[in-house]
Amino acid sequence: VYDRAAETWISTGENWMSSGEPANSLAVSGSTLVFSRPETVASGDLNSDGDVDDRVIRVYTLTGSVLGEVAALPGRAVEDFVVGDQLVAFRTREASQGSDQNGDGDTLDDVLNVLDPGAGQFFETGNAITPCPLEACDPRVPYRVRGDTVSYVTSEMDQNSDAGGVDLNGDGDRTDLVKQVFNIPKAAAEGGPFTVVDPHTGAPYDVYECADCSVPVAA
């Protein structure tokens, strides 16, 4: 423990544990450790895209005195991530991963992926994700993770750029940024993420009309 006031390290008397991996971004929540590992100092292609130019997400959990890697997580490039009490959400750039992750025929988008370390489940949402453009958004938090739910923003143009975008909020165009939610139980029941519906109007939220815009921002 570092005492900032005294500018000195204090021994807790506990043993330190190491993953043995290099890291350049790190977050801890409870017994979950999340970090990005640069391939340039990792001696290998960790996400199987044929190069060693990426940062790849790594997740470990502490069980008793054993720090172990979460086996359910495949090698995925990462731009940023948020660690909640239950979930780890992260943004993968298709160009870094070397493949089309949202099925629109290009590799120009960023896509949301979600890991439940406790359940050992990995979810490829197949949905594009973009930083929130609102000044009210917290620049330290790329998206919101609460319990079993992730809220984020999708650009309609990014979701299917080859077809000119997808009208996610039913307003007749494909030019909006729409607030979306990925909820694990609901996604499992309905087959995927869904657009948030305003309980007063029954219409999907547009991010600019959202009263509680707890949505992505670039980290």
Image (cartoon, helix red, strand yellow):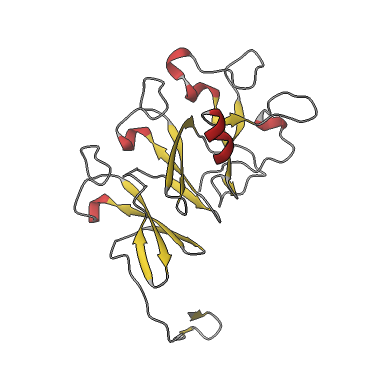
Q: In this view, does 154 lie to the left or right of 55?
A: right
Q: Nearer the viewer, residue 76 or 7?
A: 76
- Residue at horizontal 55%, vertical 30%? 154
Tell me if I can see residue 183 in this picture.
Answer: no
Q: Give the camera-side residue of 44 and 16.
A: 16
**Residue farthest to the front, as pictured:** 189
Given residues 125 and 54, the one toward you in this image is 125
Query: Can you tell which quarter of the image residue 22 is in?
Result: bottom left
Please identify the quarter of the rendering in which residue 132 is found. Answer: top right
Name the residue nearer the viewer: 43 or 135.
Answer: 43
Quadrant housing residue 171: top right
What percent of the width, then of the height, locates residue 86? 54, 53
x and y, in percent, of residue 150 in the image: 57, 42
Q: Is residue 159 left or right of residue 92?
A: right
Q: Against 109, is 39 above or below?
A: below
Q: At 59% across and 35% down in the image, what residue appears?
A: 186
Give residue 113's position: percent from left, percent from top.
45, 40
Q: Which residue is drawn at 59% across and 46% down?
A: 144
Q: How many marks?
A: 0
- Residue 139 location (% of width, % of height): 57, 49
Asked whether residue 175 appears in the rendered view, the answer is: yes
- Up/down of 209 relative to 85, above or below: above
